[in-house]
Amino acid sequence: MGYRNLRYYIGGMADWIENGGPVEKVEPAAAPPRSGQNIQSPISRTSWTGFLDLLAGWSLERLVGFWLGMIVVFGVVYWVAGIGIGWGLQAGNVAVKPDLEGLGTAIYFSFVTALSIGYGDVIPLGALRILVVAEGVAGLLIFGCVISKLVSRRQEELTAEIHRTTFEDRLDRVRTNLHLVFSDLGAVQQLQAEQGALPGQVLRRLESTVRVFRGELQTVHDVLYRSQVVPDEDALESLLANLVICLQSLAELNASRPTDNGQSPALDSGLRAIGNLAREICGECVPHTYAPALKESMDQIQALAGKFA
Amino acid sequence: MAQAESKPDSHHAYRVISREEVLARLQDPSLLLVNVMPKETFEAGHIPRSISLPVAEIEKCALQVLPDMTREIAVYCAGPT
């Protein structure tokens, strides 16, 4: 491409790592926490916002459980504080008794506080007030998380559904286009066999077919490398099989293309791009591990890439 | 560095750079390291100071990433393939 001082390190990454060369990595960007998953953010935060992030990462069931548990624990603490240090709860003008009924009253008071209702029929005494305020704040925060989870759950389901449908549509489109590419390549091949050359119109047709094929190959490449959704293996199998026959047909056509006429820079660059993309598709190099049949198809694609060098 | 002076006009006879030289010139800004593996593989681990230029994007992006045609560039990928 005109670079004059290009040098090639043949050993590549394998040789580099084997001989203990330093390796640099790119940390993946922090993903937004999803429901049901507890994703620890790599960015250090203060413990307070960290606590909120932790809560946001919890599932709905866990949040509700934590909230109820916290209320009961606070209730027991109020009750024990009443027995132990005399700073307990007062219902009317009478201190809450250290019996089961008293425990019930304490837990009832805890609920009323956490929900920030505050009837005022039971009141805390002394230092217990600090604890009550803390419970009020924590109760509100956690309850807020519960509500937002409830609201966003449906939203998340919808988004996932949209993602999936779009993805399937895209694969369907690729499949249809690959069929078209294959039949087009067949037609061009036939014309070439009949006429022994590629007259202008046929060449244009081949160029456009190669362009479509390159686009679809790019899509499959992206699906294999970048997609967040792992494609359904059946769908992928038919896609890869289609890719293989298209590549084979294109390779045959390319090999039998007359050298004197039938030259086209657009076609050449298209074929080169196809070769480059196909070279990156193989069972071992894609990030996800697929079934052996799929890996085999991918290896076939990589092997066919050599014909477009 | 006598090697670097040979065959400046040839496109296909790539001149080789050894691991020792790459290692020795890790801090040398005149040597540009280019990793041609896919972006994901690049992110998983590369030689420090390398830039990423996946094979599939060379046609499209080479001139943006490497505008200086005369610069000394060392290209590498996953292994000796």
Image: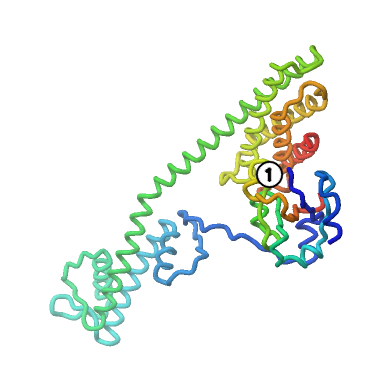
Other residues around mark 1 within 10 Å, as few (<14) / some (14–19) / many (≥20): some
How is colour applied across the structure in the image? rainbow
Q: Looking at the picture, how far across and down is residue B12, in whole percent? A: 82, 44
The one of A229 and A110 positioned closer to us in this rendering: A229
Would you say A193 lies left or right of A79 here?
A: right
Residue on which the image places disc 1: B58
Q: Quadrant of residue A282?
A: top right
Count the marks: 1
Would you say A245 lies left or right of A211 here?
A: right
Residue depicted at x 66% and y 33%: A214
Q: Quadrant of the C terminus of chain A?
A: top right
Q: Quadrant of residue A292?
A: top right
The one of A266 and A100 positioned closer to us in this rendering: A266
Above or below A16: residue A244: above
Name the secondary structure under disc 1.
helix
Q: Quadrant of the N terminus of chain A?
A: top right
Q: Residue furthest bottom?
A: A85
Residue depicted at x 39% and y 45%: A154
Residue depicted at x 15% and y 80%: A94
Q: Looking at the picture, how far across and down is residue B43, in whole percent? A: 64, 56
Q: Looking at the picture, how far across and down is residue A233, in whole percent? A: 64, 39
Q: Chain of mark 1?
A: B
Q: Residue furthest top?
A: A194
The amino acid at mark 1 is Ile
The one of B41 and B61 positioned closer to us in this rendering: B61
Q: Quadrant of residue A234?
A: top right
